[in-house]
Image: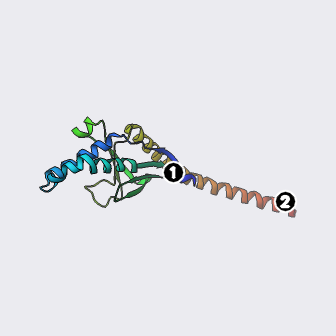
Amino acid sequence: MTKSSATIREAEFSPNIKLYTLLYVSFFITISFIGVAILPIWFFGLGQYISRRYYESLSCQLTAHHLQFKKGVMFKVEKTIPLENIQDLTFIENPLLKWLNLRILKIETASQSHPMRSDMQLVGIVDPNEFKEAVLAQRELLSNRKDGNLSDSNGQNEVVEILRDIKELLIELKNK
């Protein structure tokens, strides 16, 4: 594993996500005409199984240069967002999320293809404020390193020129 891929912080997800997923999907099943018939199957079997598997599949890691997120039961999604592309981190709450003591951390990037959609939504992170601060701190650190490297490369060029001058002076002294 390289230094850039080493995990700085891994997000922990609240077990309340299982109930949130169960209720969230139940809402959409309820509003569909045919879905009402399968609602008992969803609540007492399939929904609990899928909610548990979804919770187990969640993974989010902050590395030195990226934010990596994995989720999914039947359809798996893996996203990697470079930290320098992150433009906005927003918290979303609604009555159901508040009741379950959950929040959504919405991450938007500069290269967003759909302006009305976020690039990533992390539901139910334990200590979401701390995770958000860790992402912002790492983004700032990465930004400062890049700015510092530019000035260091100019400084290195000056050092190389000085060393060449010293080398030329030493060669001249040796030849005399």
User: Label 1: few (<14), some or many (≥20) within 10 Å?
Assistant: few
Q: Amino acid under label 2?
A: Leu
Whether residue 172 is visible, yes or no, is: yes
Check residue 147 in the rendering and tell me which mark sits there, or answer none: 1
- Whether residue 117 sits left or right of residue 162 in the image: it is left
Measuring 67% from the left and 54% from the top, which residue is drawn there?
159
Whether residue 91 is visible, yes or no, is: no
Q: How many marks?
A: 2
- Whether residue 76 sits left or right of residue 46 in the image: it is right
Q: Amino acid under label 1?
A: Asp
Above or below, 90 relative to 157:
above
Residue 129, horizontal then vertical, whole percent: 38, 37
User: Mark 2, mark 1: which one is toward the viewer?
Assistant: 1
Measuring 30% from the left and 35% from the top, which residue is drawn there?
101
Residue at the limit of the structure toward the bottom, as seen here: 175
Residue at the limit of the structure toward the left, as seen here: 33
In the picture of the structure, the residue carrying the numbered disc 2 is 173
Q: Quadrant of residue 74?
A: bottom left
What element does badge 1 sit on?
helix
User: Label 2: few (<14), some or many (≥20) within 10 Å?
Assistant: few
Measuring 59% from the left and 55% from the top, which residue is drawn there?
154
Q: CA distance from mark 2 to mark 1?
A: 40 Å
